[in-house]
Amino acid sequence: DSGVTQTPKHLITATGQRVTLRCSPRSGDLSVYWYQQSLDQGLQFLIQYYNGEERAKGNILERFSAQQFPDLHSELNLSSLELGDSALYFCASSVGSGQGSGEQYFGPGTRLTVT
Amino acid sequence: AQSVTQLGSHVSVSEGALVLLRCNYSSSVPPYLFWYVQYPNQGLQLLLKYTTGATLVKGINGFEAEFKKSETSFHLTKPSAHMSDAAEYFCAVRTNTGNQFYFGTGTSLTVIP
């Protein structure tokens, strides 16, 4: 158990809908990272937040957004969902801002299925 | 820019045989290198990491990796494969000036009894 929690574990929704994925980092970790894992794209970095502020942006679509709250949990919002958004979404956390040798700790993931 | 290449998306070994999973990276500055393992329906778990110092790094479950700067490689090895090693393995790199992880495309390891 990495200490990172994600809810829900599974999510099935229809095209055009909007969903929110939630992540709680390990106790003491200030950074949260979001990743999308699909069969054809592999593991893609979406976005990082550090202590409530956006720190780095990867291949995140404009239909997707995220935020980190004062209690350090984070939410990833996916809107106008398309079939191609079906994937595993992982959250990871780390102690610092991400620089340096510290590793990321991954949550169990949320499996999103868009029908 | 940094990138990671994992040669071989699928590797099969017999139980008890040597495991060798290849990872090459490109980085213009000294890298930090990581290997993660993902078991079915689970998140990624850190196996080992290289930061500075000794180039041979030992990780969990009997795995180790050697950082070879001249070859820009960080291959993962285990002397004797066990059935429980069947999983997806990811190599990742981050530089000491950046905060983003760059992951390889993964190698699926199958262990044949």
Image (tube, rainbow, N blue to C red):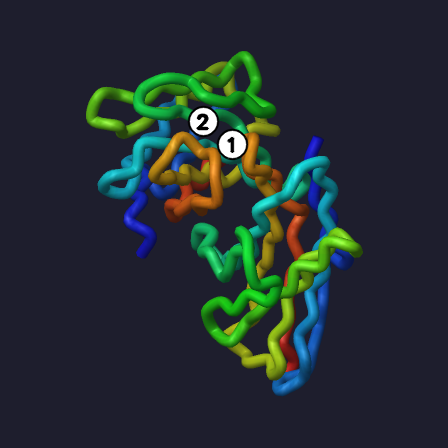
Q: Amino acid at mark 2?
A: Gln
CA gap between label 1 and label 2 equals 9 Å
Pinpoint residue A32: horizontal percent, then vertical percent: 38, 32
Residue most extreme to the front: B53
Residue A69, above or below B95:
above
Instruction: Say the numbered circle drawn on residue B62.
Output: none
Pinpoint residue B110: horizontal percent, then vertical percent: 64, 70
Residue A96 lies in quadrant: top left
Residue placed most toward the observer, A49 or B42: A49
Report the side of B6 relative to A25 (left or right): right
Residue placed most toward the observer, A14 or A109: A109
Q: Write down the residue under mark 2.
A: A48
Residue most extreme to the top: A62
Evaluate if marks 1 and 2 touch, with contact meaning CB atoms under 8 Å apart. Answer: yes
Where disc 1 sits, the SS reads loop
Where disc 2 sits, the SS reads strand
Residue mark closest to the camera, 1 vs 2: 1
Q: Residue at x 59, y 58 (%)?
A: B89
Residue B85, above or below A20:
below
Instruction: Say the numbered circle drawn on residue B99.
Output: 1
Residue B66 lies in quadrant: bottom right
Report the side of B54 relative to A107 (left or right): right
Quarter in which the C terminus of chain B is drawn: bottom right
Q: Residue at x 62, y 44 (%)?
A: B31
Residue A5 lies in quadrant: top left
